[in-house]
Amino acid sequence: MSQKTGIQKEVTLTHLNTLRLHSVAPVFINITSESQLRDLDKNGFFNDQLPFVLGGGSNILLSDRLSVPVLKMSISGVEIIEDDDKSVLIKAGAGENWHELVAYAVKKGLGGIENLALIPGTVGAAPIQNIGAYGVEIENLFSSLEVYDLKSKTFRSFNTEECKFGYRDSIFKRELKGQMVVTSVTLRLTKVNHVIHDSYFALKEYLNQYKIQNPGIEDIYHAVIAIRQSKLPDPAEIGNAGSFFKNPVIEKKQYDELRSQWEKIPGYPDGTGWVKVPAAWLIEKAGWKGLRLGNVGTYESQALVIVNHGGATGKEVLDFSKKIQQAVSELFGIDLIPEVNIIQ
Ligand code: EPU
């Protein structure tokens, strides 16, 4: 490793991606401060090519050998930067672990983040894909984020509107893809009068089962953890990247047509003529739930999660995902779009 720049060569990324794919980064730098980014830029490091920014590696599919340098974001620190009677602004470094931030907030009695417990990954990656679970998305508690802009070579800040959040989407996945390195994220959390989001079906079911009436933020936090642990595979035990595809959003007309053939097809209308259909249901009905081909398969209790049973390559996972796309397209005429980022 070069002492001055922190540049490492030929680094294996197997333990830095939750699908546990073997992959090599020809150039790798662990980023622990904002100034390190600026110094690298001053030295011309970003002149030839934009790097790949790696967070917790929980939403990526890596090829055997990457063609671009990797920046591993390890900027740490959690700080309450504003505190009034009702709420706080909490700022966290991009390299902080997301779930640890959730656990810290809940322990302090801060609300708004509890539905997002146990989502793997880092704080910096969370807004990029507008992480969401059990009726809450990060945009609901988001205040701002800071980035190093590789094009203008300056530090900038983005508010909620500027992030252009959508379903598992933001401006950082579209217009500004690859150009911004998130260094910190600031969230607004409530101290009192917490808004409880308990209407998601699985959550309601859990709270009913344990006879929890008027749940508080801690109840929701524990319920979400229990539900996730029962349905989703733990990346520490079996390689996976959570939901592999987005839930498709189709026109109501197409949904009604499908419904005449598939009476039980679930659908969540968004009120503007579009209906979100669970990709997991489509995959299951196409016969791919729990199926395994070689080292790759879908998880037995959640068809939307592709798992690495051990030793799979990125190409094997990609080929497997394409077979699922084909099966769902043939049966339902719906194209599934990967939620996971495919990195070459
Ligand atoms: N379902 C099936 N078969 C299955 C699993 C689910 O038919 O194997 C059907 C059921 O009808 C169920 C519905 O799909 O009611 C929805 O399933 P679930 O509640 O498990 O949620 P999901 O839509 O599959 C989304 C997110 C998850 C998030 C959960 C809970 C996406 C792409 N995924 O999954 O996020 O945890 O809701 O809010 O939106 C992730 O993004 O990596 C992720 C895990």
Image (cartoon, grey):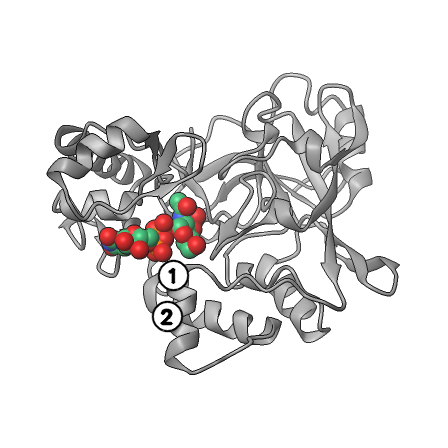
Q: In the structure shown, which secondary structural element does the residue marked by tag 1 occupy?
A: helix
Using residue 92 as the reference point, say whether residue 176 is left or right of it: left
Q: Is residue 228 above or below residue 68?
A: below
Residue at disc 1, CB closer than 8 Å to ligand 1: yes
Residue 72 location (% of width, % of height): 61, 44
Q: Is residue 332 visible?
A: yes
Q: Quarter of the image for the C terminus: give it.
A: top left
The residue lying toward the viewer, choosing from 251 and 227, is 251
Q: Residue 154, which numbered label?
A: none
Q: Is residue 308 visible?
A: no
Amino acid on which disc 2 is placed: Glu
- Residue shown at 62% from the left, 30% from the top: 164
Residue 297 location (% of width, % of height): 21, 50
Q: Are marks 1 and 2 in contact (CB under 8 Å)?
A: yes
Using residue 326 as the reference point, say whether residue 274 is left or right of it: right
Q: Residue 201, which numbered label?
A: 1
Q: Quarter of the image for the N terminus: give it.
A: top right
| Crowding near the residue tagged with mark 2, few <14, some 14–19, many ≥20 C-alpha atoms within 10 Å | some
Residue 205 location (% of width, % of height): 37, 70
Residue 75 location (% of width, % of height): 72, 50
The residue lying toward the viewer, choosing from 144 and 192, is 192
- Residue shown at 19% from the left, 27% from the top: 333
Using residue 98 as the reference point, say whether residue 156 is left or right of it: right
Figure label count: 2
Using residue 144 as the reference point, say whether residue 221 is left or right of it: left
Q: Is residue 162 above or below residue 83?
A: above
The residue lying toward the viewer, choosing from 16 and 334, is 334
Residue at disc 2, CB closer than 8 Å to ligand 1: no
Distance between the Cα atoms at labels 1 and 2? 6 Å
Q: In the structure shown, which secondary structural element does the residue marked by tag 2 occupy?
A: helix
Mark 2, residue position: 205
